[in-house]
Image: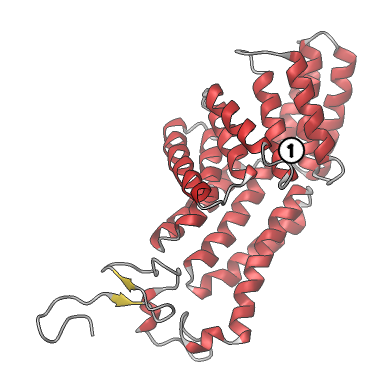
Amino acid sequence: MAFCGGCGTRLPSLCSSCGFANPEGFAFCGKCGARVTEATTPAPQGSPAVGSPQSFTPKHLAEQLSIYARSWLVISLAELGRFEEATAHAAEGIRLAEPTHHAYTIGLAHRAAGTLYLIAGDWAKARSLLEYGVAVLRTGNVRLSLAATMAGAAWALAQLGEASEALRRLREGEHDVAVRATIGMRRAWDDHVLGHTCLLLGQLDEAQYLGERAVELLASQPGGAAHALHLLGDIATHSERFDAEAGETRYRNALALAEPRRMRPLVAHCHFGLGKLYRRTGKREQGDEHLTIATKMYREMDMPFWRKQAEAELTSMA
């Protein structure tokens, strides 16, 4: 029943999963993310509606847990530079997530795939996947999962030269990251992604603050802190505040964290940064050595965006 039998007022849509009363127009539950319409729409034979008692059977819980685990596997493989494997798992995760009609699950699968392409440097694919994830999570009002997705979308937009859209997503991402922080959910990865966006948009002070804040989480999140140290190296070698000593220290500290964890894309970025730094300070032989390493690693991992930049730097006479 959509309207009250006594007064004619439209009734809220009760989520059959958690019982939350959703306002009119909500397609996904604002509390748990389940599709609200599934409570009144019969599911196809053999495919129980999300939130129905059948969806809490071991089989269907296992499917959602599988998507969750697969999403983190995708990001982990990308951090290792194993992009072919990560791409296959990302596609499978999305394929499995879509039929669940569950906002959090679909959003997570798309965030994982988008993050994969962020790490690989395929900005157009990253933007498409992350923007879709933002739309799904917003529809379901799954606020806590929006922070990393918006941050990633902002970085991709900035890399694609869409400054105004990137700035809008940056501010939205910063807001959601701040909300997460109030309940003790801080991630160095989010700060480093927002920091890279700020750097691309010329907001160096804000990028510096975000990088330093991420490094504070070194003890508990060394991988994210390694990315943040690389960001701080990029800031230190920026033309507006060039500091060779600080830049070298940041890059080498990032390398010290990334190498034993086999974070090959980040290792390559550190060599790229050191190569440019040494060339700029007249140490061409050292610079060429690091640029050669970076170029080789980018080629081996099939990262064409970054490989072309390293090759251009290596062949330049600057």
Q: Which residue is drawn at 36% across and 74% down?
A: 20
Out of 185 and 240, give the one closest to the viewer. Answer: 185
Q: Quadrant of residue 88?
A: bottom right
Q: Residue at x 87, y 43 (%)?
A: 260
The image shows residue 315 at horizontal and vertical percentages of: 80, 19
The image shows residue 82 at horizontal and vertical percentages of: 79, 52
Left or right side of 208 for 313: right
Disc 1 is placed on an element classified as: helix
Left or right side of 266 for 162: left
Please identify the residue farthest to the top as the structure is shown.
282
Q: In this view, does 73 lie above or below 196?
A: below
Is residue 280 shown to the viewer in this render?
Answer: yes
What amino acid does circle 1 point to? Answer: Ala
Quarter that holds the N terminus: bottom left
Left or right side of 140 for 83: right
Few, some or many residues within 10 Å of mark 1 (<14, 14–19, 20+): many
The image shows residue 271 at horizontal and vertical percentages of: 81, 29
Q: Is residue 287 above or below residue 104?
A: above
Left or right side of 283 for 158: left
Q: Residue at x 63, y 13 (%)?
A: 241
The image shows residue 164 at horizontal and vertical percentages of: 42, 32
Is residue 132 shown to the viewer in this render?
Answer: no
| Residue underneath mark 1 | 226
Q: Residue at x 45, y 56 (%)?
A: 143
Q: Quadrant of residue 2?
A: bottom left
Q: In which quarter of the image is residue 259?
A: top right
Q: Is residue 205 above or below residue 41?
A: above
Question: Coloring scheme of the render?
Answer: secondary structure
